[in-house]
Image (tube, helix red, strand yellow):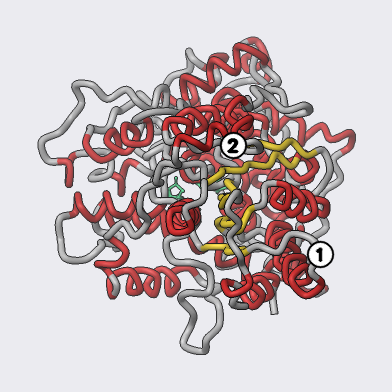
Amino acid sequence: ATMYDALRELSAVKQEDDVKPSKDGCVVYWSRNKDLRLDDNTALSYASAVAQDLHLPLVVLHIFSLGDYKSHDRSPRRIDFQLRQLAYLQKELAKLDIPLFTITHEGNRKEVPALVCDKLDEWRATGLYANIEYEVDELRRDTEILERTKKARETGKGWQGQVELMRDFCIVAPGQVLTKQGKPYSVYSPYQRSWLAEINSHLADYMHKQNGPVVANASSVRDHAVLGPMFAHEIPTSLAGFELEGGDDEAARMRKLWPVGEGVVDGIMRRFLRTKMQPAKFFEAPLESEGNEVDDPKKKSKIGEYCEGRNRVDWDGTSHISPYLAAGLISPRECIRQAFKLAGGKELPGGRDTGIGMWVQEIAWRDFYQAVLVAWPRVCMSRPYNLKYDGTVDWAEDAGGEKLKAWKEGRTGFPIVDAAMRSLKEQGYMHNRCRMIVASFLSKDLLIDWREGEKFFMQSLIDGDLGSNNGGWQWSASTGCDPQPYFRIFNPASQSEKVDPEGEYIRHWVPELRKLKGKTIHDPAAKLTKKQILDMGYVMPIVDHAKARTTAIEKYKEAAARA
Ligand code: FAD
């Protein structure tokens, strides 16, 4: 049994009869790092309805758990994004007379259950409602809260209210679709087919927004002795230990690239669903769309042309919704509802033959990787899905960490790798094709343990999400569920020609190479002398790809033989 099973068992215990709403109590929605929105939010909508029923005020609680952020390598960019969105939500909630209160907690997860229960006791809360986070530490934390309240009811000591944990982060929750043998899927294609069949066989339910809007509190909450002062509570603008490295410049850049607030997610979706692809204008500003609307969005918009667009890093061909999905500014259900509406058919498309279907498949990957976390929680604990490679791959010696450093800084001498790594540094984002290329390069060409890359991505990405990031890294390192076979190793130069044929992406991110013409830009060392390369201010390749490829295949074979 996994931690998720334990949590579900405990939360299945009927608690309502034990809960006595007190006249001066409240109902609490615990907002988490991944559900930062008011619209179509399962636990929030439910908590709001309960508060109405009981004639009690609704309070929103958010906890910054600094110890956990550290141990989970949470990026300062993702935290800055979270803080900006919370400040916006606080204003929106205040219009409904609902306070949003934050607690900054220095310790780790283990102390959170006591902290939360004590707070709820102090506020005389009758119920706590939250959306489930599927990572193992978070499941443990929530299980402890359920155990603690169960014990409190038995002993009559401590907070004894109702706790409900709800499924919200995925469209099809982990465990909801299983193989014919009743097991979790470890291969994506059959998973995706079942996922799509599940949605299409309950289409009306999935396409109808089940979660009602948040209902306003009575304005008298503002005079409440305990809750009233919460309205003066301010959301911090940064958290100690998670300041943006690049200071104000970086803050301004992040705000421009990844805005929050009124209408932002609608704008990003509209831009993807209704406007045309912009060749050679790869990602610069997600909301710029004026004048680019198309008459036939089903075919001619970015989503319409997604089958080709998604493979070109020099085009602006993907949605850029990932940070908003990762932090929950938009619900994944809303994404597929919009796709379904645009497709205009009787079923949600999910095949590879249309842009819309292809995009829906990508959204299914997100659910797939959450289901993997739940079924094989070891992947949350730095272990490979495929136990054949658990501690057995003989990763290369990297004296002084020089190669890892060159990779992180975009100085490997492989232009597409360097361009991608520099885009990550600048934008907190990287195109999916590039994520695959740089991950393959780190784990196969440099033979550096993929966990180093996984960690660096989490520390740098604005859309960092354990499930998708770990899934992507283990796919690339061939240690994961349904991975890239270990002998299929990306050749950076030929990948570069495919994804950036004219070299525009490279020219943008690696200005040293701006003057190079033709194919030379993909592999300067094949055509130019060392002197010519160094004179341009660029670097020589830090590894010989052909040799590295042979070595990697040998090492993976040896690891499999040892297991
Ligand atoms: P679109 O192409 O518009 O796709 C729409 C949405 O589908 C994405 O926003 C995302 O939520 C989901 N999606 C797309 N591809 C994948 C995928 N392969 N796996 C899971 N979900 C997917 N995605 C993250 O959200 N967070 C991560 O930390 C993350 N780390 C990754 C690490 C590696 C090594 C790799 C190979 C992929 C990683 N991805 C991650 C998946 C993918 O690269 C991004 O979701 C995508 O680039 C985001 O851009 P977009 O929103 O324009 O995507």
The numbered disc on residue 157 is 1
Nearest to the observer: residue 513 or residue 283: 283
Nearest to the observer: residue 286 or residue 30: 30
Residue 446: where, in percent of width, then height?
A: 73, 44
Q: Give the residue furthest to the front.
A: 23
Q: Secondary structure at mark 2?
A: loop
Q: Quadrant of the N terminus?
A: bottom right
**In this picture, residue 42 sits left or right of residue 450:** left
Residue 284: where, in percent of width, then height?
A: 42, 22
Asked where in the image residue 242 lies, by quadrant, the reply is top right
**In this picture, residue 320 sits left or right of residue 110:** left
Badge 2: few (under 14), some or many (20 or more) residues near its Cα, within 10 Å? few
State the residue at coordinates (70%, 70%).
3
Is 282 located above or below residue 385 in the figure?
Answer: above
Q: Give the residue furthest to the right.
A: 400
State the residue at coordinates (62%, 14%).
532
Nearest to the observer: residue 311 or residue 326: 326
Asked where in the image residue 82 lies, by quadrant, the reply is top right
Q: Which residue is mark 2?
A: 224
State the residue at coordinates (64%, 78%).
9
State the residue at coordinates (79%, 60%).
158
- Viewer can see residue 105: yes
The numbered disc on residue 72 is none
The amino acid sitting under disc 2 is His
Badge 1: few (under 14), some or many (20 or more) residues near its Cα, within 10 Å? few
Q: Is mark 2 within 8 Å of ligand 1?
A: no
Is 196 located above or below residue 67 in the figure?
Answer: below
